[in-house]
Image: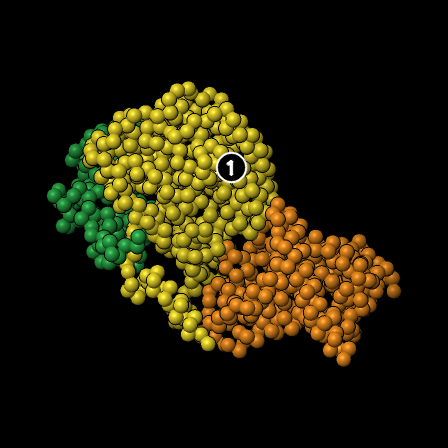
Chain colours: A orange, B green, C yellow
């Protein structure tokens, strides 16, 4: 009974969806204010979702219908599952075991993977280019982002999210591992395909990228997955680098502070080309974060 | 190079092929040439580094006159030189100048579809402005073009 | 399908988020690199050149002003100057000065809009929003001056319709002061923002020789170091009394085009101030006969996007025999398929925006809707199809 509640309402299910919508609204509103616009009203993400769900879903011919329908569901399921392992709302995660950090990160990547597959599944050229870009980008930011999140895990000596969170409450890793924080923050932008890493869905080039053929329910599910991913990603980075998440107030303040940082970064930059993104990640992101890792391991080795 | 000298230089460049020349306005020179000399004249202009092609105008002189006139406008500063080529309505042909001046292709395609002047040597004869399913043989800028009002969207 | 495996084509247009107006481009790509390109125009073709032949001289002014929503004044101006030349009259100096002021205001409006569009193509939404917000200042000025935000209808054959009074003069000067400060800031952004420069520096570079060969005009040519500006080469309206400084840059990439257009903004501010400070006194209109003498003329003006070329032929009646309009986009468009080859697909919208294309201007002329023949549907048939389709749904 408790488990069912956990999955359906809190922290899974409804809470996540509602929370994701609020975070998305906050993001849109912040960017709008930074760009001197008014921005949407608070229920805009909900209204968009309801509208999309009510709309006709067009399934293109000549493709695998099963995959077309299943991929958005898998994407949303992956994002929701990953939320079970992170300290949402500053409370202890619903499920916790050694190595759940890797599982949570994998579940988050599932969304991107599904997006890429959904794009490859269609015959539309925008979708195909978008899918190629989505997957290319996945392979470029995934490793540095993972390593950046493993930095705190290494410091805490555990690959369990709740333990890292507890460790972080006494150590502000933002100051101890600044490079890791920056890479994690920018990695989050890449993971969420926000500017300047929105090349996979650059509307002026390839319309909506991998999502071009999606409409109605499928598109709504992908968008919901993205909202949940935003919330989970913020929670992870905030709990690892911003002094841990011990209670709901800390959770709200720290994730919103992080979101403000993301919004400023988004509105400051133009879109990077996909080749520039790959170059940026592998030339700078990966190397820097690996260098920091090496230093941490050496220090760890000497002190123990 | 002031306008007067520029026009004089252009007149000299084209002297070999000139059938008639006049100066309708102080900054303009009109040179009538034969269609067969068009490419040679344009190359002479290019070799003499005189101005740039500013456009091609197709004129329908009317059914009675029985001729089209194709105007190649070159501009250099304030000076405008116009090469005028006449071609009969019932067999309207001019050579393409794309071989010497590739940027003329849009103008020539427009001329071809709007006035029905055949441009020999044009590499791309697809419609540029008119719809793909445009009726064969209807050239809207001809004076006698019958544009059926019933088919025209109001 | 077999063709598809050989060639992977990314269609841009006729409806595409990168294009604010309809045009159709097909880019053959190999991975992300463009290997071929073709252009198809005419989606905004309205048969204006043909239509001018059945309207009188005055009506045509209103028709031609509607060729383009952005550079509307300059079309009417080119036409009026040409007709005045044919009729052997010239507008009074004050009218010419007002024409120049409106033309420059229009240039500012067009360049600011371009700045926003180009930034949007590069995914730089903040610059887009800011430059369009500032453009509103100018739209308000134009509205205060002429009563309209677009299609200002400032011209008459033989003069202008309105005067600029002291209040309006102050309004313009105040707006220019604000815009000058903003423009300096934008110049700073486009030349120093590291991320933005990665999308503009060295992209779509056109050498001066290439620009000459492609017949580029306007700011696009000037960014490649080709000194070509009708306002300087063949001054019209009040430009002979208020000379323009030529803005040149010689690199020829997208960054150059930004720099040239932003510098032209600053030059326009200066020029408007100068004209307003030394406004000639006198009449606003000259008398023009209803029938225009037989003859031909060529009228060239510098539109925001480059040289606008009008060929006007009169047969002595109250309607023109032929009006040929050659817009700047027609010249510059030829450069897109050429420059696009070898570039990244992601840079194509930027290269396209770099010439500041105006499809409505470009397309001008065809009229006909070919009726109901399978490929083209009448509005009625489309409507009926929609009704039937949804009735047929369970």
The percent position of residue A125, horizontal first and vertical second, equals 46, 65
Vertical placement of residue B154 versus A81, above or below: above
B26 or A223, which is in the foreground? Answer: A223
Secondary element under disc 1, as helix, strand or loop, is helix
The percent position of residue C342, horizontal first and vertical second, equals 45, 54
The residue that appears at 35% across and 60% down in the rendered structure is: C379
Vertical placement of residue B122 versus C232, above or below: below
Residue A303 in sight from this viewpoint = yes
Position of A67 with respect to B111 (left or right) is right
Most extreme residue toward the top is C281
Badge 1 sits on which subunit?
C
The residue that appears at 34% across and 35% down in the rendered structure is: C78
Residue A110, quarter of the rendered image? bottom right
Residue C255 in sight from this viewpoint = no
The percent position of residue C228, horizontal first and vertical second, equals 40, 34
Position of B116 with respect to A103 (left or right) is left
The residue that appears at 26% across and 33% down in the rendered structure is: C297
Most extreme residue toward the left is B64
The residue that appears at 17% across and 42% down in the rendered structure is: B61
Q: Which residue is mark 1?
A: C140
């Amino acid at each position: 009974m408790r488990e069912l509640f956990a999955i359906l309402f809190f922290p899974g299910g409804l809470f996540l969806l509602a929370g994701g919508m609020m975070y998305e609204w906050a993001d849109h509103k912040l960017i709008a204010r930074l760009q001197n616009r008014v921005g949407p009203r608070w229920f805009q993400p909900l209204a968009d979702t309801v509208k999309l769900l009510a709309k006709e879903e067009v399934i293109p011919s000549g493709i695998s219908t099963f995959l077309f329908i299943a991929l958005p569901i898998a994407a949303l399921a992956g994002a929701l599952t990953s939320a079970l392992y992170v300290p949402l709302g500053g409370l202890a995660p619903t499920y916790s075991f050694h190595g759940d950090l890797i599982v949570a990160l994998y579940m988050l990547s599932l969304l991107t993977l599904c997006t890429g597959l959904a794009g490859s599944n269609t015959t539309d050229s925008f979708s195909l280019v978008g899918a190629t870009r989505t997957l290319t980008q996945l392979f470029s930011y995934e490793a540095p982002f993972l390593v950046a999140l493993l930095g705190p895990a290494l410091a805490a000596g555990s690959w369990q999210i709740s333990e890292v969170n507890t460790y972080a409450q006494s150590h502000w890793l933002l100051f101890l591992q600044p490079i890791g924080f920056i890479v994690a923050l920018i990695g989050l932008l890449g993971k969420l395909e926000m500017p300047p890493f929105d090349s996979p869905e650059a509307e002026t080039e390839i319309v909506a990228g991998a999502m071009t053929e999606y409409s109605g329910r499928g598109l709504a599910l992908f968008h919901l997955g993205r909202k949940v991913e935003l919330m989970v990603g913020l929670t992870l980075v905030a709990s690892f680098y911003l002094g841990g998440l011990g209670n709901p107030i800390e959770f709200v303040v720290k994730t919103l502070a992080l979101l403000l940082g993301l919004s400023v970064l988004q509105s400051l930059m133009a879109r990077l080309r996909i080749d520039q993104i790959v170059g940026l990640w592998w030339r700078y992101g990966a190397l820097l974060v690996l260098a920091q890792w090496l230093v941490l391991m050496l220090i760890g080795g000497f002190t123990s | 190079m002031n306008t007067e000298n520029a026009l004089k230089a252009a007149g000299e460049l084209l002297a070999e092929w000139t059938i008639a020349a006049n100066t309708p306005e102080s900054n303009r020179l009109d040179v009538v040439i034969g269609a067969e000399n068009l490419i040679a004249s344009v190359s002479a202009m290019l070799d003499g580094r005189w101005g740039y092609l500013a456009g091609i105008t197709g004129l329908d002189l009317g059914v009675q006159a029985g001729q089209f006139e194709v105007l190649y406008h070159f501009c250099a500063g304030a000076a405008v030189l116009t090469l005028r080529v006449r071609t009969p309505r019932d067999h309207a042909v001019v050579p393409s100048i794309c071989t010497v001046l590739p940027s003329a292709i849009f103008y020539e395609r427009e001329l071809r579809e709007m006035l029905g002047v055949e441009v020999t040597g044009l590499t791309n004869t697809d419609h540029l402005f008119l719809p793909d399913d445009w009726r064969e043989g209807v050239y809207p800028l001809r004076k006698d073009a019958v544009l059926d009002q019933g088919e025209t969207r109001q | 399908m077999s063709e598809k495996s050989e060639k992977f084509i990314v269609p841009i247009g006729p409806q595409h988020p990168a294009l604010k107006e309809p045009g159709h481009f097909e880019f053959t790509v190999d991975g992300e690199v463009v290997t071929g390109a073709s252009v198809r125009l005419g989606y905004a073709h309205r048969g204006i050149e043909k239509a001018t032949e059945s309207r009188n001289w005055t009506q045509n002014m209103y028709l031609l002003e509607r060729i383009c929503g952005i550079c509307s004044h300059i079309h009417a101006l080119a036409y009026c100057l040409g007709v005045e030349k044919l009729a052997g009259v010239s507008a009074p100096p004050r009218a010419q000065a007002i024409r120049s002021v409106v033309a420059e205001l229009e240039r500012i409006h067009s360049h600011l809009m371009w700045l926003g569009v180009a930034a949007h193509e590069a995914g730089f939404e903040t610059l887009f929003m800011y430059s369009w917000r500032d453009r509103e200042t100018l739209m308000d000025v134009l509205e205060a001056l002429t009563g309209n935000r677009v299609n200002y209808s400032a011209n008459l054959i033989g003069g202008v319709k309105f005067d600029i009074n002291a209040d309006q003069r102050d309004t313009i000067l105040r707006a220019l002061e604000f815009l000058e400060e903003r423009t300096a800031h934008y110049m700073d952004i486009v030349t120093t923002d590291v991320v933005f420069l990665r999308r503009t520096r060295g992209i779509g570079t056109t050498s001066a020789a290439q620009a000459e060969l492609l017949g580029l005009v306007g700011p696009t040519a000037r960014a490649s170091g080709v000194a070509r500006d009708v306002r300087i080469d063949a001054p019209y309206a009040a430009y002979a009394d208020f000379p323009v400084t030529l803005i040149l840059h010689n690199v020829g990439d997208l960054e150059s085009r930004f720099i040239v257009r932003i510098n032209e903004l600053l030059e326009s501010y200066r020029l408007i101030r100068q004209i307003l400070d030394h406004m000639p006194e006198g009449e606003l209109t000259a008398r023009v006969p209803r029938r225009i003498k037989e003859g031909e003329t060529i009228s060239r003006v510098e539109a925001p996007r480059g040289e606008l070329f009008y060929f006007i032929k009169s047969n002595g009646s109250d309607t023109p025999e032929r009006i040929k309009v050659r817009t700047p986009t027609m010249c510059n468009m030829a450069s897109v398929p050429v420059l696009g080859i070898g570039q990244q697909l992601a840079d194509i919208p930027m290269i396209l925006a770099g010439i500041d294309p105006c499809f409505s201007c470009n397309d001008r002329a065809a009229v006909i809707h070919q009726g109901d023949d399978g490929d083209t549907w009448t509005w009625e048939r489309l409507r009926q199809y929609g009704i039937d389709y949804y009735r047929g749904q369970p």
